[in-house]
Image (cartoon, rainbow, N blue to C red):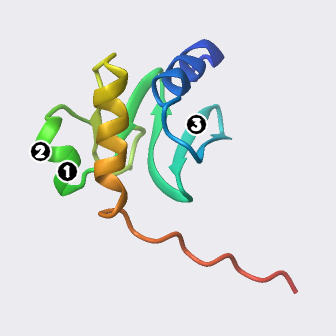
Amino acid sequence: MATTNEYADYVMSLLSQLEDIMLRKMMGEYLLYYKGKLFGGIYDNRFLVKITPHSSSVLDREEIPYEGAKPMLMVESEDMEFVNGLVEGMYDELPEPKPKKKKS
């Protein structure tokens, strides 16, 4: 089951206090970026974030986004302050984006 546009809009509304949030649609699901770093996604109407020291200190429900993927943590809170603090707290722990390959 692919994620609905309504659920993606809902998650974006939870993240609306953060600047430089990007939602990228990919194969019926969505990837979430904060200041250029991938921090999570929306899979089958589930808001999931990468496992980092900060995210694992405040979340505990692991989910597999899709078959063969690494586990992620499910965000079940509807508290905008909590969700925005979660993403901000994860930022420094996330890997830098990979450099884009130059087209020849």
User: Foreground: 77 or 67?
Assistant: 77
Which is nearer the N-term, disc 2 or disc 3? 3
User: Foreground: 35 or 1?
Assistant: 35
State left or right for residue 102 relative to residue 67.
right
Q: Do callouts 1 and 2 mark residues in contact (Cβ within 8 Å)?
A: yes
Q: Secondary structure at mark 1?
A: helix
Residue 40: image quadrant is top left
Badge 3: how crowded within 10 Å, few (<14), some, or many (20+)?
Answer: many
Residue 79, labelled with which disc? none
Q: Tell me how many marks there are.
A: 3
Q: Secondary structure at mark 2?
A: helix
Badge 1: how crowded within 10 Å, few (<14), some, or many (20+)?
Answer: some
Residue ID at (45%, 23%): 14
The mark lying in front, picked from 2 and 3, is: 2
Provide the residue designation for mark 1: 54
Residue ID at (49%, 24%): 11
State left or right for residue 15 relative to residue 103.
left
Name of the residue lying farthest toward the bottom: 104
Hey, what amino acid is under mark 3? Tyr
Measured as percent of width and height from the top left, residue 94 is found at 36, 62
Name of the residue lying farthest toward the right: 104
Provide the residue designation for mark 3: 30
Image quarter of the C terminus: bottom right
Measured as percent of width and height from the top left, residue 50 is found at 33, 49
Per the model, the C-alpha gap separating discs 2 and 3 is 24 Å
Provide the residue designation for mark 2: 57
The mark lying in front, picked from 3 and 1, is: 1
